[in-house]
Amino acid sequence: MSQLIVCQNSHGIILAADSKAAALDLSGNMTHLTVHRMLQLSAHTAVLTGGAAEGMGIIGELKNFLEEEGVDDVQDAYEAALPFLATRFETFMRKLCEIVPLDPVHHLYFILGGYTNRDPERHFRLYLLWTRKKLPQLDGDEISFAYCVPRLMGLEYKLNKLCQANTPLEDVLPAVKKGMEERAMRDDEIGPPLRFAFITKEGFREV
């Protein structure tokens, strides 16, 4: 289990993630770890990973790959990240099947966000990379204004209204923090530290 919350408007992007993850040991037993689900990829891009703890190793590999390619624009990052993550995801799922049967509870998913110069009308983009189709295939969808994984429909509705009104990020952040904190209080599988960040034209910044 994990909780990711993202939203965006013309001012930039807000990213939020908890830091608790479940992992399987070599005997197939479940353990819990404190992990970093949010990773800055470049000056203007970042990625979140949800689900199994193995996602942190995968996004670390993605960061190294994008740095080697010199990628900073989020649209370029998405075009490079989708096939890269799909390959790593398939490898992860096939190894997992050697221990336990294939099951949606073991999913990994990713949210990529950042700034682009390729579209002067819409500089900020968010992408969800997940198993939309049959396992173990990873696919991608663009996020319009706000999204939570797992879904928090009431919070998404509130964040969508705030972002469609182009509310400054500093005024949207309290709603994101409140939603994350309430989720952590209700569910023991969502754990601190709770991390929050902005992506603006100036770049990535934790808040």
Image: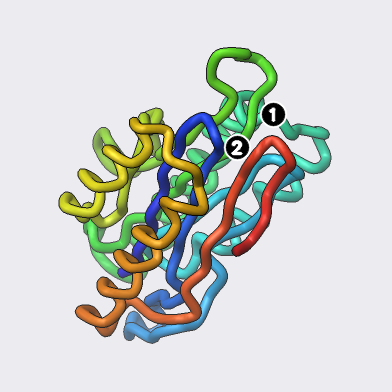
- The three-letter code of the residue at mark 1 reads Asp
Image quadrant in which the N terminus is located:
bottom left
Q: Are marks 1 and 2 in contact (CB under 8 Å)?
A: yes
| Quarter occupied by the C terminus | bottom right
- Alpha carbons under labels 1 and 2: distance apart: 7 Å
153 over 115 or under it: above or below: below
In terms of depth relative to the viewer, which is nearer, 54 or 140?
140
- Location of residue 173 by image quarter: bottom left
Left or right, 158 with reference to 167: left
- Residue 167: x %, y % from top left: 42, 40
Vertical order, 67 against 61 (above or below): above
Residue found at x 38% / y 86%: 31
Whether residue 59 is visible? yes
Residue receiving disc 1: 73
Q: Which mark is residue 93?
A: none
In the image, what residue type sits under mark 2? Gly
SS at circle 1 = loop
Q: Earlier in the sequence, mark 1 or mark 2?
A: 1
**Considering only vertical position in the picture, is 92 above or below 195?**
above
Which residue bears the numbered disc 2? 114
